[in-house]
Image: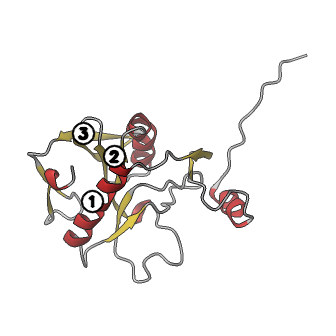
């Protein structure tokens, strides 16, 4: 007799949405679907929340009429992933994505603010976003007080990685006329 091992049950976005509609998860659950797995998101601390509010205010001001700033909302990446990045900068859309979740081709920039999730954001999220050709991915690294910038997605990873400090600045890849001083983020 051959050995039988427990198997993971992976779910897709359609099943994920049906579970949500059926009320399987408590309303205050912080969950996201990554590569078919339902993951519990880390609680948001005050430092994380403050940096998110700062970044939201900055990017909303700088990208008015050029992009939509989306905070901790779903992004559909293929059939198996629907992460909720801390911040997404999206292409303009007349109905503000009221009829569907944004998809990879709608994303200009994804940002994760990381302290306890730094390793996950650097590894799994980075590969997920690169696989789906997200053009630019930032990690606001609260542990090392820096901004990690990933660009040029190719074959499941980013070819270009920069680590910026408060004395640096950068232009958005998809909106190059917009210059950001890293000190305004950190």
Cα distance in 3D space between marks 2 and 1: 23 Å
Q: Could you say where residue 28 lies in the image, as x and y percent from the top left?
A: 60, 59
**How many other residues sit within 10 Å of disc 3, few (<14), some (14-19) or many (≥20)?**
few
Pointer 3: what residue? 161
**How many other residues sit within 10 Å of disc 2, few (<14), some (14-19) or many (≥20)?**
many
Whether residue 67 is situated above or below residue 168 in the rendered picture: below
**How many other residues sit within 10 Å of disc 1, few (<14), some (14-19) or many (≥20)?**
many
Please give left or right for residue 183 compared with residue 20 in the image. Answer: left
Pointer 2: what residue? 153
Instruction: From the viewer's side, name the closer residue of 46 and 112.
Output: 46
Cα distance in 3D space between marks 2 and 3: 10 Å
Q: Which mark is residue 55?
A: 1
Residue placed at 68% from the left, 49% from the top? Answer: 11
Secondary structure under tag 3 reads strand
Q: Could you say where residue 150 lies in the image, as x and y percent from the top left?
A: 28, 44
In this view, the mark in front (1 or 3):
1
Q: Could you say where residue 88 lies in the image, as x and y percent from the top left?
A: 37, 61
Cα distance in 3D space between marks 1 and 3: 20 Å
Q: Which of marks 1 and 3 is nearer the N terminus?
A: 1
Examine the image and state in which quarter residue 119 appears. Answer: top left
Please give left or right for residue 167 compared with residue 125 in the image. Answer: left
- Locate the N terminus and report the quarter of the image it occupies: top right
């Amino acid at each position: 007799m051959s050995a039988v091992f427990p198997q993971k049950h992976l779910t897709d976005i359609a099943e994920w949405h049906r579970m949500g509609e059926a009320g399987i998860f408590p309303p205050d659950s912080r969950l996201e679907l990554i590569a078919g797995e339902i993951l519990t998101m880390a609680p948001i601390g005050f430092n994380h929340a403050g940096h998110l509010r700062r970044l939201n205010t900055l990017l909303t001001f700088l990208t008015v009429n050029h992009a939509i700033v989306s905070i901790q909302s779903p992004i559909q990446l293929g059939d198996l992933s629907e992460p909720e990045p801390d911040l997404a900068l999206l292409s303009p859309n007349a109905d503000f994505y009221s009829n569907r979740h944004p998809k990879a081709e709608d994303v200009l920039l994804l940002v994760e603010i990381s302290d306890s999730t730094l390793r996950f954001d650097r590894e799994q999220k980075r590969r997920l976003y690169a696989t789906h050709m997200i053009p630019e991915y930032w990690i606001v690294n609260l542990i090392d007080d820096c901004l990690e910038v990933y660009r040029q997605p190719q074959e499941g990873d980013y070819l270009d990685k920069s680590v910026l400090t408060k004395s640096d600045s950068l232009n958005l890849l998809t909106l190059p006329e917009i210059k950001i001083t890293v000190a305004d983020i950190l």
